[in-house]
Image (cartoon, rainbow, N blue to C red):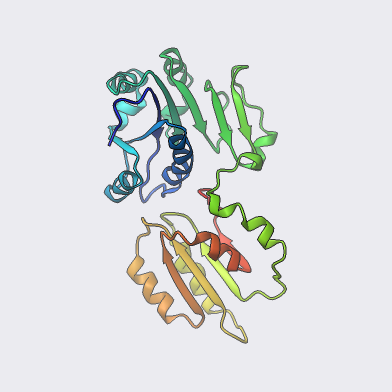
Amino acid sequence: MTDSSATHRCLILADANPQIGTGHVMRCAILGRHLRERGIAVDYVVADTTAGMQAWIRREGFGLHVLSHTQRDDAEQLHRYLQQLGSQRSLLLFDSDREAFYRADYQRKLRDYGLGLLMITFHNAEAFYVHLLHNQNPLALDTVYHCPLATRQLLGLEYVILKPAYEALYEASRTKSTARISTILLTFGGSVQWNLTATVLGLLDRLASPVPLRIIAVVGALYRGLDALKKQVAASQHQAELYVQTEEMPRLMYEADLAITSGVLTD
Protein backbone atom coordinates (compact mmCIF):
# COMPACT_ATOMS: atom_id res chain seq x y z
CA MET A 1 0.00 0.00 0.00
CA THR A 2 1.28 3.46 -0.86
CA ASP A 3 1.77 5.95 1.98
CA SER A 4 0.21 9.12 0.54
CA SER A 5 1.28 11.17 3.58
CA ALA A 6 5.02 10.62 3.07
CA THR A 7 7.05 13.74 2.34
CA HIS A 8 10.10 11.76 1.22
CA ARG A 9 9.70 8.89 -1.20
CA CYS A 10 11.97 6.56 -3.16
CA LEU A 11 10.44 5.12 -6.32
CA ILE A 12 12.20 2.06 -7.71
CA LEU A 13 11.98 1.49 -11.46
CA ALA A 14 12.83 -2.18 -11.89
CA ASP A 15 11.23 -5.34 -13.24
CA ALA A 16 11.40 -9.10 -12.72
CA ASN A 17 10.35 -11.63 -15.35
CA PRO A 18 11.64 -14.87 -16.92
CA GLN A 19 13.75 -12.96 -19.45
CA ILE A 20 15.74 -10.78 -17.02
CA GLY A 21 15.37 -12.71 -13.76
CA THR A 22 14.71 -11.32 -10.29
CA GLY A 23 18.03 -9.60 -9.57
CA HIS A 24 16.97 -6.02 -10.29
CA VAL A 25 13.98 -6.18 -7.93
CA MET A 26 15.78 -8.13 -5.19
CA ARG A 27 18.85 -5.89 -5.19
CA CYS A 28 16.75 -2.74 -4.84
CA ALA A 29 14.79 -4.30 -1.98
CA ILE A 30 18.00 -4.33 0.09
CA LEU A 31 18.36 -0.60 -0.38
CA GLY A 32 14.63 -0.10 0.09
CA ARG A 33 14.68 -1.64 3.55
CA HIS A 34 17.51 0.66 4.64
CA LEU A 35 15.59 3.69 3.36
CA ARG A 36 12.42 2.64 5.17
CA GLU A 37 14.36 2.48 8.43
CA ARG A 38 15.15 6.16 7.87
CA GLY A 39 11.50 7.12 7.46
CA ILE A 40 11.44 7.21 3.64
CA ALA A 41 8.47 5.63 1.86
CA VAL A 42 9.55 3.12 -0.80
CA ASP A 43 7.46 2.09 -3.82
CA TYR A 44 8.19 0.02 -6.90
CA VAL A 45 7.11 1.31 -10.31
CA VAL A 46 6.96 -1.79 -12.52
CA ALA A 47 5.93 -2.37 -16.13
CA ASP A 48 6.87 -5.96 -16.97
CA THR A 49 6.91 -7.91 -13.72
CA THR A 50 5.20 -11.24 -13.09
CA ALA A 51 2.18 -11.45 -10.81
CA GLY A 52 4.15 -13.60 -8.38
CA MET A 53 6.92 -11.01 -8.05
CA GLN A 54 4.35 -8.23 -7.68
CA ALA A 55 2.86 -10.19 -4.77
CA TRP A 56 6.36 -10.57 -3.28
CA ILE A 57 6.90 -6.80 -3.44
CA ARG A 58 3.66 -6.23 -1.55
CA ARG A 59 4.48 -8.90 1.04
CA GLU A 60 7.78 -7.14 1.69
CA GLY A 61 5.78 -4.05 2.60
CA PHE A 62 6.67 -1.88 -0.40
CA GLY A 63 4.18 0.18 -2.36
CA LEU A 64 3.50 -0.96 -5.91
CA HIS A 65 2.53 0.94 -9.06
CA VAL A 66 1.99 -0.91 -12.34
CA LEU A 67 2.45 1.31 -15.39
CA SER A 68 2.94 0.62 -19.07
CA HIS A 69 6.39 0.86 -20.64
CA THR A 70 5.12 3.93 -22.49
CA GLN A 71 4.28 5.69 -19.23
CA ARG A 72 7.63 4.89 -17.63
CA ASP A 73 9.73 5.54 -20.74
CA ASP A 74 8.37 9.06 -21.21
CA ALA A 75 9.70 11.56 -18.66
CA GLU A 76 6.66 13.85 -18.88
CA GLN A 77 4.13 11.05 -18.41
CA LEU A 78 6.13 9.58 -15.53
CA HIS A 79 6.38 12.96 -13.83
CA ARG A 80 2.62 13.57 -14.13
CA TYR A 81 1.95 10.22 -12.51
CA LEU A 82 4.41 10.87 -9.69
CA GLN A 83 2.82 14.24 -8.97
CA GLN A 84 -0.38 12.40 -8.02
CA LEU A 85 1.47 10.67 -5.19
CA GLY A 86 1.89 13.98 -3.40
CA SER A 87 5.41 13.56 -2.00
CA GLN A 88 7.35 16.80 -1.66
CA ARG A 89 10.72 15.19 -2.42
CA SER A 90 11.20 12.05 -4.49
CA LEU A 91 14.19 9.95 -5.48
CA LEU A 92 13.96 7.75 -8.55
CA LEU A 93 16.10 4.62 -8.33
CA PHE A 94 16.70 2.98 -11.72
CA ASP A 95 17.87 -0.62 -11.88
CA SER A 96 17.06 -1.67 -15.42
CA ASP A 97 18.48 -2.23 -18.88
CA ARG A 98 15.66 -0.22 -20.48
CA GLU A 99 17.21 1.89 -23.22
CA ALA A 100 14.85 4.79 -22.50
CA PHE A 101 16.24 5.23 -18.98
CA TYR A 102 19.73 5.79 -20.41
CA ARG A 103 18.74 8.64 -22.74
CA ALA A 104 20.31 11.97 -21.86
CA ASP A 105 17.11 13.94 -22.59
CA TYR A 106 15.11 11.60 -20.33
CA GLN A 107 17.46 12.04 -17.38
CA ARG A 108 17.75 15.79 -17.90
CA LYS A 109 13.98 16.29 -17.95
CA LEU A 110 13.53 14.38 -14.71
CA ARG A 111 16.29 16.44 -13.08
CA ASP A 112 14.62 19.63 -14.28
CA TYR A 113 11.40 18.49 -12.58
CA GLY A 114 13.31 18.50 -9.30
CA LEU A 115 13.55 14.73 -8.90
CA GLY A 116 16.60 13.02 -7.46
CA LEU A 117 18.07 10.32 -9.70
CA LEU A 118 20.04 7.22 -8.67
CA MET A 119 21.17 4.87 -11.46
CA ILE A 120 22.37 1.33 -10.73
CA THR A 121 24.17 0.18 -13.85
CA PHE A 122 26.56 -2.42 -15.16
CA HIS A 123 26.99 -0.65 -18.48
CA ASN A 124 29.50 1.86 -19.78
CA ALA A 125 27.16 4.39 -21.31
CA GLU A 126 28.81 7.56 -22.56
CA ALA A 127 27.08 9.94 -20.17
CA PHE A 128 24.84 10.03 -17.12
CA TYR A 129 22.94 13.06 -15.82
CA VAL A 130 22.05 11.59 -12.45
CA HIS A 131 22.83 12.59 -8.88
CA LEU A 132 24.14 9.16 -7.84
CA LEU A 133 25.73 6.61 -10.17
CA HIS A 134 26.35 3.11 -8.83
CA ASN A 135 28.32 0.33 -10.52
CA GLN A 136 29.68 -2.37 -8.22
CA ASN A 137 31.57 -4.12 -11.01
CA PRO A 138 35.32 -3.82 -10.26
CA LEU A 139 35.92 -2.94 -13.92
CA ALA A 140 33.96 0.26 -13.32
CA LEU A 141 37.02 1.71 -11.58
CA ASP A 142 38.73 1.89 -14.97
CA THR A 143 35.75 3.52 -16.68
CA VAL A 144 35.52 7.26 -17.30
CA TYR A 145 31.90 8.35 -16.95
CA HIS A 146 30.81 11.71 -18.33
CA CYS A 147 28.65 13.19 -15.59
CA PRO A 148 27.92 16.60 -14.04
CA LEU A 149 30.53 17.62 -11.49
CA ALA A 150 28.00 17.17 -8.69
CA THR A 151 27.32 13.51 -9.55
CA ARG A 152 28.49 11.14 -6.81
CA GLN A 153 30.00 8.01 -8.36
CA LEU A 154 29.85 4.84 -6.26
CA LEU A 155 32.10 2.45 -8.16
CA GLY A 156 33.70 -0.91 -7.48
CA LEU A 157 33.58 -3.55 -4.79
CA GLU A 158 33.57 -1.00 -1.96
CA TYR A 159 29.92 -0.34 -2.83
CA VAL A 160 28.64 -3.89 -3.40
CA ILE A 161 25.01 -4.21 -2.29
CA LEU A 162 24.84 -7.08 0.19
CA LYS A 163 22.29 -8.47 2.57
CA PRO A 164 23.43 -8.28 6.23
CA ALA A 165 23.63 -12.07 6.41
CA TYR A 166 26.63 -12.05 4.06
CA GLU A 167 28.72 -9.60 6.02
CA ALA A 168 30.06 -12.23 8.43
CA LEU A 169 30.97 -14.72 5.72
CA TYR A 170 34.32 -13.21 4.83
CA GLU A 171 35.92 -13.64 8.24
CA ALA A 172 34.40 -17.11 8.67
CA SER A 173 35.64 -18.28 5.28
CA ARG A 174 39.25 -17.29 6.00
CA THR A 175 39.66 -20.32 8.27
CA LYS A 176 37.75 -22.73 6.03
CA SER A 177 39.81 -25.38 4.24
CA THR A 178 39.10 -26.22 0.60
CA ALA A 179 41.93 -28.74 0.24
CA ARG A 180 39.38 -31.31 -0.91
CA ILE A 181 36.41 -30.37 -3.06
CA SER A 182 33.39 -32.33 -1.90
CA THR A 183 30.56 -29.77 -2.08
CA ILE A 184 29.74 -27.87 -5.27
CA LEU A 185 27.24 -25.01 -5.52
CA LEU A 186 25.35 -24.42 -8.77
CA THR A 187 23.58 -21.08 -9.12
CA PHE A 188 22.87 -19.20 -12.33
CA GLY A 189 20.41 -16.44 -11.45
CA GLY A 190 16.69 -15.97 -11.02
CA SER A 191 15.36 -17.29 -14.33
CA VAL A 192 18.16 -19.28 -16.05
CA GLN A 193 17.07 -18.86 -19.65
CA TRP A 194 19.58 -21.39 -20.99
CA ASN A 195 18.85 -24.08 -18.39
CA LEU A 196 22.45 -24.08 -17.23
CA THR A 197 21.57 -25.70 -13.91
CA ALA A 198 20.33 -28.87 -15.59
CA THR A 199 23.19 -28.86 -18.10
CA VAL A 200 25.95 -28.57 -15.51
CA LEU A 201 24.28 -31.09 -13.21
CA GLY A 202 24.22 -33.53 -16.13
CA LEU A 203 27.93 -32.98 -16.76
CA LEU A 204 28.76 -33.55 -13.09
CA ASP A 205 26.83 -36.83 -13.19
CA ARG A 206 29.27 -38.00 -15.85
CA LEU A 207 32.22 -37.09 -13.63
CA ALA A 208 34.09 -40.04 -12.17
CA SER A 209 34.40 -39.60 -8.41
CA PRO A 210 35.54 -42.12 -5.77
CA VAL A 211 32.74 -40.91 -3.49
CA PRO A 212 29.52 -39.05 -4.33
CA LEU A 213 29.81 -35.29 -4.33
CA ARG A 214 27.36 -33.03 -2.57
CA ILE A 215 25.73 -30.87 -5.25
CA ILE A 216 23.73 -27.84 -4.12
CA ALA A 217 21.53 -26.47 -6.92
CA VAL A 218 19.86 -23.10 -6.32
CA VAL A 219 17.29 -21.59 -8.69
CA GLY A 220 15.03 -18.55 -8.48
CA ALA A 221 11.28 -18.16 -8.31
CA LEU A 222 11.00 -17.68 -12.09
CA TYR A 223 12.86 -20.85 -13.05
CA ARG A 224 11.12 -22.66 -15.89
CA GLY A 225 11.26 -26.46 -16.06
CA LEU A 226 11.28 -26.96 -12.29
CA ASP A 227 9.52 -30.35 -12.41
CA ALA A 228 12.12 -31.77 -14.81
CA LEU A 229 14.95 -30.40 -12.67
CA LYS A 230 13.50 -32.00 -9.53
CA LYS A 231 13.49 -35.39 -11.28
CA GLN A 232 17.07 -34.88 -12.45
CA VAL A 233 18.20 -34.00 -8.93
CA ALA A 234 16.47 -37.06 -7.50
CA ALA A 235 18.13 -39.33 -10.09
CA SER A 236 21.65 -37.91 -9.68
CA GLN A 237 24.47 -40.26 -8.74
CA HIS A 238 25.66 -37.57 -6.35
CA GLN A 239 24.06 -36.27 -3.18
CA ALA A 240 22.11 -33.55 -4.97
CA GLU A 241 19.94 -30.95 -3.24
CA LEU A 242 17.61 -28.38 -4.82
CA TYR A 243 16.68 -25.01 -3.31
CA VAL A 244 14.13 -22.66 -4.89
CA GLN A 245 14.16 -18.93 -3.98
CA THR A 246 15.88 -19.79 -0.73
CA GLU A 247 16.76 -17.53 2.17
CA GLU A 248 19.58 -19.92 3.11
CA MET A 249 22.02 -18.72 0.46
CA PRO A 250 24.66 -17.43 2.94
CA ARG A 251 24.85 -20.85 4.63
CA LEU A 252 24.94 -22.71 1.32
CA MET A 253 27.72 -20.49 -0.01
CA TYR A 254 29.79 -21.07 3.11
CA GLU A 255 29.33 -24.84 2.96
CA ALA A 256 30.40 -25.03 -0.70
CA ASP A 257 34.03 -25.75 -1.61
CA LEU A 258 33.49 -24.67 -5.23
CA ALA A 259 30.83 -22.57 -6.96
CA ILE A 260 29.85 -22.86 -10.61
CA THR A 261 27.89 -19.71 -11.40
CA SER A 262 27.11 -17.09 -13.97
CA GLY A 263 28.21 -14.40 -11.53
CA VAL A 264 24.83 -12.99 -10.56
CA LEU A 265 25.08 -9.78 -8.57
CA THR A 266 21.84 -9.68 -6.57
CA ASP A 267 23.22 -10.44 -3.12
In front of the other: 251 or 12: 251
State the image quarter where residue 75 is shown.
top left
At x 30%, y 31%, the residue is 3
- Point out residue 127 in the picture as x, y percentages from the top left corner: 56, 23
- Point out residue 155 in the picture as x, y percentages from the top left corner: 63, 35
**Image height of 113 relative to 1, above or below:** above
In front of the other: 217 or 144: 217
Q: Quadrant of the N terminus?
A: top left
At x 45%, y 31%, the residue is 93
State the image quarter where residue 161 is shown.
top right
**Image height of 142 relative to 8, above or below:** below
- Point out residue 128 in the picture as x, y percentages from the top left corner: 54, 24
Q: Is residue 205 left or right of residue 174?
A: left
Q: Is residue 13 left or right of residue 254?
A: left
- Point out residue 17 in the picture as x, y percentages from the top left corner: 35, 48
At x 72%, y 65%, the residue is 175
State the image quarter where residue 36 is shown.
top left
In front of the other: 205 or 2: 2
Q: Residue furthest bottom?
A: 210
- Labels in figure, total: 0
